[in-house]
Every structure is written in C-alpha cells, then in structure tokens.
Image (cartoon, rainbow, N blue to C red):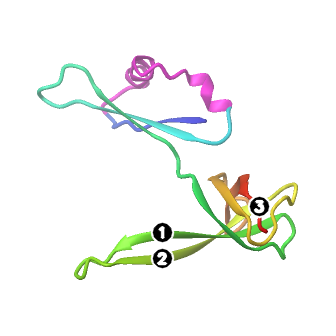
Amino acid sequence: MRVTLCRTQSQTTETCARVLEMANISPSLSSLWGTQLRASPHLTSRQTQPRILIQAAQELEGIVSSTKMQKTAVVSVIRLVKHPKYHKRIRKTKKFYAHDEEEICSEGDFVRIIPTRPLSKTKRFAVAEVIRAAK
C-alpha cells in the first residue's frame, strides 16, 4: 500500500500527518506493494475536524486474451455502461497489458490485475492472481 496525501498549499505536512493518525493509517504502510491509499483532508465552514476520504487503487478483473509475449498477458476487461439517452446497458471492452512474472496465465483464464509503476510504454498493471483457470 502506498499512502498519498492530497493537500493544498495552505496545509502543512504536519496537518496531513495528523489526519493520517486520525484515520489510523500508519506511514509505514508505504513500503507495501499493491493498493494505493489517498487521504484527503477537507474542512468546511461547519466542520471542526477534517473529513477524511480514503480511496483504494483500481483493481480490475478480466479474461486473458493473449499470452504470446514474454512475461506479459493481455487482459480484456468488460464493463457495463448505461446509454445516456436510451438507458440500455452496453458492454464496453478494454484491453490492458499486465506483467506476468512467472507466466502462470494462459488464454481464457479469469484473473485479477492491480496497478503498478510503468513497466513499459503500455504495461501499467501486474497479474495479482488467477481467479479461475480456463477449461
């Protein structure tokens, strides 16, 4: 997990550290790999204490469509969106290149991918686990 502080110029590092303490998030979590937490303190005129917004990084699930590259799997992620006018649900597919260090994926597997640092021009995800193997 990486702890990232969203702060404005008026807030100091001490203020953000105090906000993380209020949320019971230790700064030592930044050494772990995987989920990224973002703590965002917001103060309004009616609030005396900051409101803390904690968001996890995007984890996606999809089907492996190709493993022809070395240590790379192409994962197709399908999502449903509602048409703005006709309100029908439409399938949208997007392909992500995911790093597969042990080459455990095969075509047709259902996998979970997590974001990582950029590994190449197009590879921004890594295979976390194989949820269901292909038949």
Q: Left of 135 or right of it: where is 94?
A: left
Label 2 neighbour load within 10 Å: few <14, some 14-19, many 20+: few
Query: Answer yes or no: do the residues labelled 1 and 2 have beta carbons within 8 Å?
Result: yes
Depth check: give the residue in front, 37 or 62. Answer: 62
In terms of sequence position, does the residue under pointer 1 or pointer 3 come before the other? Answer: 1
Task: Please tell me how crowded label 1 is: few (under 14), some (14-19), or many (20+) other residues with Cα within 10 Å.
Answer: few
According to the picture, the residue beneath numbered tag 3 turns out to be 133
Residue 130, x across and y down, in percent? 74, 55
Q: Position of residue 88 (x, y in %)?
A: 31, 78
Q: Report helix, strand or loop for mark 1.
A: strand
Q: Residues within 10 Å of mark 3 (few under 14, many from 20)?
A: some
Real-space CA distance between mark 3 and mark 2, rounded to the nearest whole angstrom: 23 Å
Single out the residue that lies furthest toward the bottom. Answer: 86
Query: Nearest the camera: 98 or 132?
Result: 132
| SS class, disc 3 | loop
Dot in front, 1 or 3: 3
Residue 80: x %, y % from top left: 43, 70
Magenta-drawn stretch contains 71: no
**Residue position marked by numbered label 1 in the rendering:** 79
User: Which stretch is magenta?
Assistant: 10-31
- Farthest front residue in view: 135
- The amino acid pointed to by label 1 is Arg
Circle on res. 109: none
Disc 2 marks a residue whose amino acid type is Lys
Q: CA separation, marks 1 and 3? A: 21 Å
Q: What is the chief secondary structure element of the magenta stretch?
A: helix
